[in-house]
Image (spheres, rainbow, N blue to C red):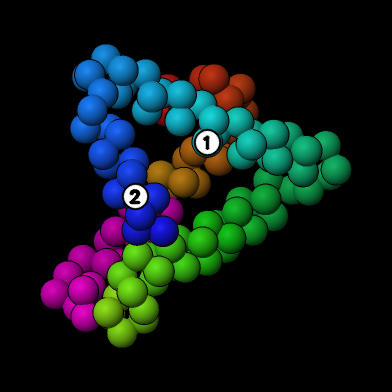
Amino acid sequence: LNSVFACASALMATLSQGARGRLIMLLGVVAVSPDSLSIRLLESTGASDWCILFWQQVCLGIILGVVATLRAGGLGLLWTSTKPVCRLLPLAVVIQGVVYTGFTVSLFYTSAANTLLF
């Protein structure tokens, strides 16, 4: 996983500022499309907005936890690397939760293209 991030960093360093911006925009659209599609599919099956939001947050938390653990090199190293900023972690969790909640709720009420403006 670290080699993927190293390769991406090397690629970004070789691109011009305009090409870097277009790549980031393209990755944003690619990242939003499956999310929007899954939300539309779940809405069509009758799942409530709150149910979709809850399970999306749970899955996202698990995925981010696994990625953070893998990038740090294990739970012990993750704990020691976050120990100095432990008092700020609850604030970071709340802010991230608000952003992802706002993103998901915006997909409930508008198209994926307009959600990118959020």
Give the residue drawn at x 46%, y 46%. 100
Q: Is residue 87 magenta?
A: yes
Q: Amino acid at mark 2?
A: Phe
Above or below, 83 relative to 35 = below
Q: Is residue 72 left or right of residue 112?
A: left
- Disc with the residue nearer the chain's start (2 vs 1): 2
Judging depth in this view, the residue of 75 and 105 nearest the camera is 75
Residue at the right extreme, as displayed: 45
> Which residues, given as a range, are shown in magenta?
80-97
Judging depth in this view, the residue of 110 and 28 nearest the camera is 28
Q: Nearer the viewer, mark 2 or mark 1?
A: 2
Give the residue drawn at x 41%, y 44%. 99
Residue at the top extreme, as displayed: 18
Which of the 4 quarters of the picture holds residue 56?
bottom right
- Give the residue number, with chain letter if any, for mark 2: 5
Q: Is residue 87 visible?
A: no
Which of the 4 quarters of the picture holds residue 67?
bottom left
Number of the label disc, if any, that sits on residue 31: 1
Mark 2: which secondary structure?
helix
Q: Amino acid at mark 1?
A: Ala
Which of the 4 quarters of the picture holds residue 21?
top left
Q: Is residue 90 magenta?
A: yes
Above or below, 46 relative to 69 = above
User: Whole-percent x and y of residue 79?
Assistant: 28, 80
Distance, label 2 to label 1, CA atoms, is 17 Å
Above or below, 6 relative to 22 = below
Mark 2, residues whose alpha carbon is within 10 Å: few (<14), some, or many (≥20)?
few
Mark 1: which secondary structure?
helix
User: Whole-percent x and y of residue 47?
Assistant: 78, 48
User: Whole-percent x and y of residue 62?
Assistant: 52, 66
In which quadrant will I find the C terminus? top left
